[in-house]
Image (cartoon, helix red, strand yellow):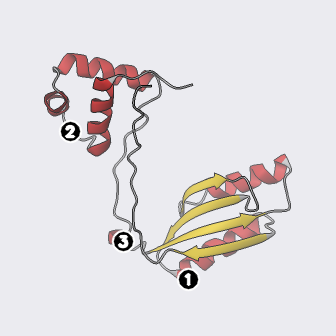
Amino acid sequence: MSVQIDALDRKILREMQEDASQSLDEIAKKVGSSKTPVWNRIRKLREAGVIGRQTVLLDAEALGLEACFFVLIRTSEHEAEWQNRFLAALQARPEVMEAHRLAGEIDYILKVRVQNARAYDIFYQALISEVKIFNVTALLSMEEIKSTPLLPLPQPT
């Protein structure tokens, strides 16, 4: 279910996506409104689930996490028990930045951030010791060309 947002909501959301540490005054000034209406809209957007938790973006390389692997997983197991064990294993591993269940020949794709290839191997060995996996292909990202947490905000139809 999508939430109806207007032009002012989109401006507020753009500002918050760009820098959520801005004060309410700064956001209101940038979107051409006053503080109280902006606060009320932000509150409503939170209540509607449009705005989730707010976090800080960290620089992976500055923290020594220089290797980014995309891990393609094929499984011959499709029972609920296996899926629950697999999902629990992924949730328990902070190296897994993203996990997606796919349609097609590959069942899952993971984005994994680690220090180096050795750290990836430790992650891999731990994962396959926890759940049976038919096939794993790891692709090392040589260069991050684009990465953004900013969502494209839909225009009114």
Q: Which residue is mark 1?
A: 118
- Picture coordinates of residue 25, whole percent (x, y): 14, 29
Q: Which residue is mark 3?
A: 61
Is label 3 in a helix, a strand or a loop? Answer: helix
Q: Quadrant of the C terminus?
A: top left
Residue at horizontal 34 percent and vertical 54 percent from the top: 57
Query: Measured along the vertical axis of the image, is residue 98 above or below residue 47?
Result: below
Give the Cα distance between marks 1 and 3: 16 Å
Query: Measured along the vertical axis of the image, is residue 152 above or below residue 47?
Result: below
Residue at horizontal 39 percent and vertical 31 percent from the top: 155
Residue 17 horizontal side relative to residue 105, left or right: left
Residue 82 horizontal side relative to residue 13, left or right: right
The quarter of the picture where residue 44 lies is top left
- Picture coordinates of residue 150, whole percent (x, y): 38, 46
Is label 1 in a helix, a strand or a loop? Answer: helix
Dot 1 crowding, Cα within 10 Å, few <14, some 14–19, many 20+: few
Is label 2 in a helix, a strand or a loop? Answer: loop
Of badges 1 and 3, nearer the viewer stands 3
Q: Which residue is mark 2?
A: 22
Residue 151's mark?
A: none
Query: Measured along the vertical axis of the image, is residue 121 above or below residue 108?
Result: below
Q: Nearer the viewer, residue 28 or 85?
A: 28
- Picture coordinates of residue 5, whole percent (x, y): 39, 23
Q: Amino acid at mark 2?
A: Gln
